[in-house]
Amino acid sequence: VERTFIAIKPDGVQRGLSGEILQRFERRGFKLVGLKLIKVSEELAEKHYAEHRERPFFKGLVEFITSSPVVAAVIEGKGVVATARAMIGPTNPLNAPLGTIRGDYGIDIGRNIIHGSDSPESAEREIALWFTPEELLDWQATIAGWIYE
Ligand code: GTP
Ligand code: MG
């Protein structure tokens, strides 16, 4: 099965949206396999957003993501990488449909509440960057048979 990395950014945590956002993924049927509250270091932030190094917003992005705690999570399930991205919505919240996390809670692109890996390759890289193997749990959800046929 597939896993993806999500991070509730400082704005989402400060606004008290962590529980509600995690609940959306749980209700969809995805299973938590890793979860922690973390004060992101500059080094981790720069590695995580390495692809945006040359962009004008990079410095502000690193400052923002390191400014206040982040909820980091790994969730598991069939098709979870693409489905989590769909549930999160487009990067700019003003373009995000209602019913998506960014469309329901956000306004500014620099305060878009949550990150989700954009491909299975990114997910693998980001999970390894944010979590140690011991922090990821293999466990059976007893309700699985009511979610998957
Ligand atoms: P993430 O899940 O956070 O990676 O968002 P994304 O994949 O939808 O967008 P992308 O990877 O292109 O950009 C990473 C993050 O940089 C975004 O979530 C924004 O917070 C920020 N960002 C992207 N473009 C802009 C921009 O034009 N201006 C500002 N201020 N921030 C931006
Ligand atoms: Mg991205």
Image (tube, grey):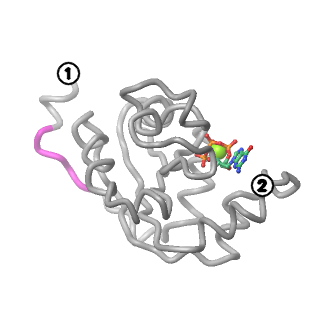
Q: Is mark 2 within 8 Å of ligand 1?
A: yes
Q: Residue at x 41, y 31 (%)?
A: 100
* Label 1 vs label 2, nearer the camera: 2
User: Residue 56, image x and y in percent?
Assistant: 85, 54
> Going from the N terminus, do you reach mark 1 or mark 2 first?
2
Q: Amino acid at mark 2?
A: Phe
Residue positioned most to the right: 54
Q: Position of residue 89 (x, y in %)?
A: 50, 32
Task: State the SS at label 2.
Answer: loop
Quarter the C terminus occupies: top left
Q: How many marks overall?
A: 2
Q: Which residue is mark 1?
A: 149
Residue at 84 percent across and 51 percent down: it is: 55
Q: Is residue 142 magenta?
A: yes
Q: Which residue is mark 2?
A: 57
The local crowd at label 1, few if under 14, some if 14 to 19, many if 20 or more residues have their Cα within 10 Å, is: few
Residue 71 magenta: no
Q: Which residues are magenta?
A: 139-143
Instruction: Tell me residue 123's x, y (percent).
Output: 56, 47
Residue 100 horizontal side relative to residue 120, left or right? left
Quadrant of res 99:
top left
Q: Is residue 18 above or below residue 97?
A: below
